[in-house]
Image (spheres, rainbow, N blue to C red):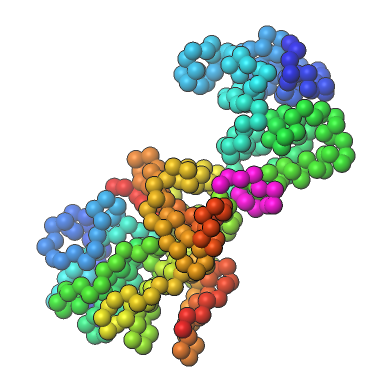
Amino acid sequence: MKIKLFEISELDFKALSVPILFNDDSSDRVFGLISDNKNKYKLGWQSDVIKPVIKWINSNICSIGIDQKFIIFEFDTGKVLLKTQLDYFFFDTLILNDSVYIITELELIKIKIKDFFIQESYALPDYFESIRIEKDSIIVKCVDSQVININ
Amino acid sequence: MKNKQFAKYPLCNKFLCYIDKEKDRESKLGDHGVRKYDYEIGRFTSIDPLWEKYTGWTGYQYTRNNPINRIDYNGMNDGQFGSWMQVGPMQELILGDKNVNTYQEIIENSEKLANKQLINAWAEIGLMGLTGLATDVALSSPFAAKYLSIAGNYVKGLLGFGDDAVNLGFSINPSKFDYFFGRVVSGPEHNISRSAQNLKDLTTLGIKNEVQLTNIFKNALKDGSIISSKTSKYGTTVLKGIEIGNNGKLEVGFFYQGGNMNSTPSISTIIPKIYK
């Protein structure tokens, strides 16, 4: 599915009558509208250097992460399947086999695609640097060069 | 004027004044930086720039008329012997008016500037428990070398760099400062971007250097409100938040190795919050 994320003004954000994916009235500085021309959703976040990461879990289920916010929802209905406030800053989303991994600064969170429940959290000893897949293992490298093996 | 401080400086001569400040040959006044000091009458010759803070005192007094127990190195602030443990005064003491941005600069400069004056000052204010040591003794080998080492280690210790750490209550890996102040410019894109965003957010909060940030960490550890506590197989991270004026809030992660809450925590991360 082809979607576009447009940055909009705060005034437009307030005026637009479309579902909100996430926002925070006290600290949002950037506002966006995500659309496939048919469905529209709005969202707000704090960081102005970093952009939201949008990943498709399947042809209709979409994930968006930015700052400490993460959501999984059905694009054609707007049904929220998972919405969580992260403890650390969001970095990326990895979709592997039957799971979604939310990668944050100091933690990986595993979510089962079957029910979208958080299955497990993996703490990192230092800031996340990179991730690679080896057979059935996920190898995470941290900034301090420590390597964590997640089975 | 004879007193404890003056008596301790046997090298005071026509070039050096009270507490080793340079003496103006014509006026014979000591140059404390912000103001000139007349050591014959024991008064500054110009009004205290911070007079509003000390309205009960004349604007010309030196160390609130308590030169036995207090000392004023720059003509701006006085402090008690042995209590100049704070990072701000320490930076000022070591570097004078020099503007520095990183602790690395302070360490380098403190090692560079660990000269007679610094040794005097440090011995005098008792930072190392060396009060009472005469200047000439301090300068003689091997004491001088020892002091040079102590000088560097003291500042390093402030950050938990060295074994001789003077306990700030927490430690921090120096590379974290790179991440907090936008100095990560290579490696994964998300780290570079987050580092740049951290710099921007800290600047918005008015936090411009490592010294300021370290002081905020100190305050957060002592007075911050606990936002969350999370335990993993590595240890426990307590996230504490502290308001930064009206601009926003800084959340600071304090990591306790092995979950030992009596140990000294290390700084694991920061989460700046900017209010609208």
Establish if B201 lies above or below A83.
above
Find the residue positioned furthest to the right: B141
| Magenta stretch: includes residue B163 | yes
The mark total stands at: 0
Find the residue positioned furthest to the top: B41
For image coordinates 27% across by 84% down, the residue present is A114
- The location of residue A118, given as percent across then percent down, is 32, 74
- The location of residue B101, given as percent across then percent down, is 57, 46
Left or right: residue B181 versus residue A113 is right
Establish if A119 lies above or below B141.
below
Task: Report the span colored magenta.
Answer: B159-169
User: Which is the main secondary structure of the residues drawn in magenta?
Assistant: loop
For image coordinates 68% across by 52% down, the residue present is B162
For image coordinates 74% across by 11% down, the residue present is B1
Left or right: residue B127 versus residue A146 is right
- The location of residue A2, given as percent across then percent down, is 24, 80
Left or right: residue A75 versus residue B269 is left
Is residue A68 visible in the rendered structure shown here? yes
- Between residue A53 and residue B163, name the one nearer to us: B163
Find the residue positioned furthest to the left: A17
Establish if B100 lies above or below A67.
above
Is residue B98 visible in the rendered structure shown here? no
For image coordinates 47% across by 21% down, the residue present is B53
- Between residue B169 and residue B66, name the one nearer to us: B169
Name the quadrant containing residue A4.
bottom left
Establish if B206 lies above or below A40.
above
Name the quadrant containing residue A17.
bottom left
Find the residue positioned furthest to the bottom: A135
| Magenta stretch: includes residue A84 | no
